[in-house]
Image (cartoon, helix red, strand yellow):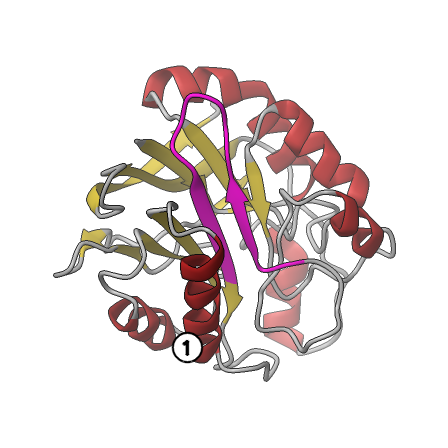
Amino acid sequence: MRILFLGDIVGRPGRTAVKKHLAEIRANTRADLVFANAENASGGLGLSGEGAKELLNAGLDLLTSGNHIWKFKDIPSYMAREERLIRPANFPPGLPGRGLCVLRKEGLPPVAVLNLMGRTYMTPLDCPFRAADALLAQLDAEAPDVRVRLLDFHAEATSEKAGLAWYLDGRVSSVLGTHTHVQTADARLLHKGTAFMTDLGMCGPRDSCLGMTIAPILRKFLTAAPERFEVAGGPVTLCGALLEIDDETGQARDITAWRFDTE
């Protein structure tokens, strides 16, 4: 099985590029499934229900998210209706949504996608390591036939991402980092068959600071005064990872950093 997992989609430019090129990307990569982190897809910060619907209707198979998922008021009710949008499972109990989705698509083996958030330099949530244990125990009890298991770990610190990958080595097919918007060059297979990449990067404007217009960010660095950030324009680069996974064992066979420039 081949799965393409895209990094954080940033604003309208990211959404537009994904929609425009998704069919071409599927053909070129021969991906059976395409997932993406969409927590910044609406206005560059957060995700609206309408934005999520737009991306799923465009052909993405599932959306993950992160710390900005609660910005838009319509997202809790949307998540209650749409299982293909998930959020970090280690948010406190009682919040809307879910941190795990088992996707069963005709003609393909079932795939589980898990979503967790880091705590280092982030909002202090429940322990992602223990939350991962709980999610995997839930899968083993409720869907033991699901061998392919992918985790989006939305985190800041590279050490925390690497630590969770080693902790879960052999228990999930992949641990893929999101949040920093910068694609890392460390895609690798760990010893027991888990594919790992510290950060998938972003799907957003190439000539930017993490997807945002450069000038206000430079002014903020130079003056320390508040600035309003806006999503940049221009050519868009789509980044992610392309995985090959053994359907029967769930072990990854290969992982490569993937990049697509729209111009």
Does 109 lie within the magenta span? yes
Left or right relative to 126: residue 130: left
Q: Position of residue 154 (x, y in %)?
A: 50, 63
> Taking 129 as reference, is 188 left or right?
left
Q: In front here: 77 or 229?
A: 77
68 horizontally vs 150: left or right: right
Q: Which residues are magenta?
A: 98-115
Residue wearing tag 1: 129
Residue 257 location, quadrant = top left
Q: x, y percentage for residue 37?
A: 55, 48
Relative to 214, residue 247 above or below: above
Query: Could you tell me the amino acid type at mark 1?
Result: Phe
Image height of 166 relative to 125, above or below = above
In the figure, residue 83 lies in which quadrant?
A: top right
Residue in the picture at 34% in, 20% down? 30
Is residue 9 visible from the viewing direction of this image?
A: no
Verify whether residue 243 appears in magenta: no
The furthest residue to the left: 191
Q: Nearer the viewer, residue 220 or 116?
A: 116
* Disc 1 packing (10 Å; few <14; some 14–19; many ≥20): some
